Image (cartoon, rainbow, N blue to C red):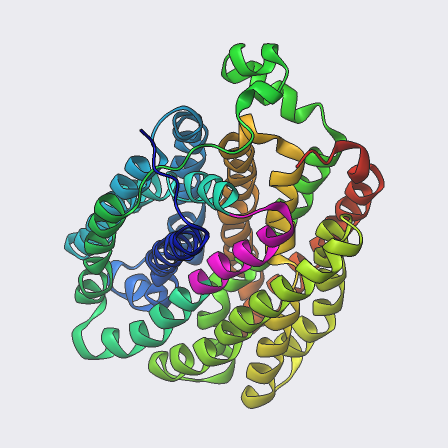
């Protein structure tokens, strides 16, 4: 006999799950982004170029992340998401912790690939779980909390990482920040139950549910709205992740700040700006989406456009304090549409393909945003350095920023067909 939970119990369970998932998101962002803090000392010790650093931070990680994200997500659509998520965080946390043992560039690339394999199991499973715990009108807020706490993890990693690397070196920094994630994985495994999947796959066309992976992918890609959302988010991540990966080296080279200084102040400025922007955007998005569902794509388009002038101030001002202040504002504005953009993917995917829809988005993000973004900035920096010296990153950033306009176009196009494709 099944005992139904009382409304109060269901409420507590829902927010407990969101809390644990958000904690996992924090370690996901921290372990993925800590390499950004360590770029300069790693480059110095291993004697590698900006292009090689770009490959390490971006494409080598993204290639593994993309390759395994879709099959893992398909498993999450059919099997226990809690088990997949718990194993994933324990794998990536352990491999982050042991990354400090690498003695060569190749060894570090292989270890970061292992971290990417673990992280490929995080977002699709977590997003699918959030959807099964929150109704449509609350999802933008829930996704914003998940993303906001994740960014807070990146902030903590950035601030602590700069202090740790100057005290213990980059190798021990990996170990100190990576190991606690294993405990969080155990917490998720033993305290969260797999929920019943909402709306069940029977609501979807049988051919798409039973036709296998390629049929499910084809069903998603037939939707104009979904295609434009994926293109828009991937291109915007090309800009934000490409620039974000090199922001610490930029402040060290252009403004002469120490690693500890830039890690602390950049974490406070752009990091907290992203957290606050994500949470405020989630609250505002929940209100706006209640009036018109198209705000799920309109809000990220507006945020991307409004952030551009503040990016320009960050890159071009000769004053470090003004650059840090502008970084706060650009991060705050740029993240306002984060939660609604992610919620829009779930709204057009349908219940039977939620994890897969996120995995395809993560594939595009991995290859275009996380992979090409840092690599292109690094290549442009190496190419420009003979002519502009220490300012090469400034001009690389300006070139990459133009892609934001392309992203905004796709968000607008998604808004035109959104109403006909939104399903839940």
Q: Which stretch appears magenta?
A: 134-150
Examine the rendering and report whether any part of residue 233 can be seen.
yes
Q: Residue at x 70, y 57 (%)?
A: 300
Front residue (pair 209, 40): 209
Q: Residue at x 39, y 26 (%)?
A: 75
Does residue 378 sit above or below 215 in this rendering? below
Q: Could you tell me which quadrant the N terminus lies in? A: top left
- Residue 275 magenta-drawn? no
Residue 347 placement (x, y as % from top left): 65, 39
What secondary structure predominates along the stretch shown in magenta? helix
Does residue 108 sit above or below 79 in this rendering? below
Q: Could you say which quadrant of the image residue 154 lies in?
A: bottom left
Residue 314 placement (x, y as % from top left): 62, 77
Q: Residue at x 57, y 43 (%)?
A: 368
Does residue 209 sit above or below 251 in this rendering? above
Q: Could you tell me which quadrant the C terminus lies in? A: top right
Residue 110 placement (x, y as % from top left): 27, 41
Q: Residue at x 59, y 48 (%)?
A: 342
In the picture provided, is 419 more to the left or to the right than 215? right
Front residue (pair 18, 87): 18
Q: How many marks?
A: 0
* Outermost residue to the left: 101
* Outermost residue to the right: 416
Residue 5 placement (x, y as % from top left): 39, 45
Examine the rendering and report whether any part of residue 107 can be seen.
no
Front residue (pair 1, 184): 1
């Amino acid at each position: 006999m099944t005992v139904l939970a009382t409304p109060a119990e269901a409420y507590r369970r829902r927010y407990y799950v969101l809390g644990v998932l958000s904690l996992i998101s924090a370690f996901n962002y921290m372990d993925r982004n800590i390499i950004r803090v360590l770029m300069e000392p790693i480059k110095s010790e291993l004697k590698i170029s900006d292009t090689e650093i770009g490959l390490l931070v971006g494409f080598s990680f993204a290639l593994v992340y993309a390759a395994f994200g879709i099959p893992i997500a398909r498993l999450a659509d059919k099997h226990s998401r809690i088990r997949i998520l718990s194993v994933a965080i324990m794998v990536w946390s352990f491999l982050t912790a042991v990354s400090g043992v690498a003695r060569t560039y190749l060894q570090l690339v292989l270890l970061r690939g292992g971290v990417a394999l673990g992280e490929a199991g995080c977002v699709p499973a977590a997003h699918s779980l959030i959807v099964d715990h929150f109704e449509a009108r609350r999802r933008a807020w829930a996704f914003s909390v998940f993303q906001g706490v994740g960014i807070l993890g990146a902030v903590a990693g950035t601030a602590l990482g700069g202090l740790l690397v100057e005290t213990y070196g980059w190798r021990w920094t990996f170990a100190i920040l990576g190991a606690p994630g294993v405990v969080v994985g155990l917490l998720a495994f033993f305290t969260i139950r797999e929920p019943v999947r909402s709306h069940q796959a029977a609501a979807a066309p049988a051919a798409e549910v039973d036709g296998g992976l390629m049929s499910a992918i084809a069903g998603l890609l037939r939707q104009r709205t979904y295609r434009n959302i994926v293109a828009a988010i991937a291109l915007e991540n090309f800009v934000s992740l490409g620039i974000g990966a090199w922001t610490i080296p930029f402040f060290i080279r252009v403004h002469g700040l120490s690693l500890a200084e830039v890690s602390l102040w950049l974490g406070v400025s752009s990091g907290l700006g992203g957290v606050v922007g994500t949470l405020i955007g989630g609250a505002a998005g929940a209100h706006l989406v209640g009036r018109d569902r198209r705000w799920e794509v309109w809000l990220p388009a507006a945020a991307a456009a409004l952030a551009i002038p503040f990016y320009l101030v960050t890159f071009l001002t000769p004053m470090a304090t003004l650059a840090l202040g502008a970084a706060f504002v650009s991060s705050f504005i740029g993240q306002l549409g984060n939660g609604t953009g992610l919620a829009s993917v779930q709204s057009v995917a349908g219940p039977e393909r939620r994890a897969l829809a996120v995995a395809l988005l993560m594939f595009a993000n991995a290859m275009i945003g996380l992979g090409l973004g840092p690599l292109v900035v690094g290549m442009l920096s190496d190419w420009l350095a003979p002519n502009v010296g220490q300012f090469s990153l400034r001009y690389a950033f300006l070139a990459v920023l133009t892609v934001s306009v392309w992203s905004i176009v796709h968000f607008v196009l998604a808004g035109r067909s959104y109403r006909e494709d939104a399903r839940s």
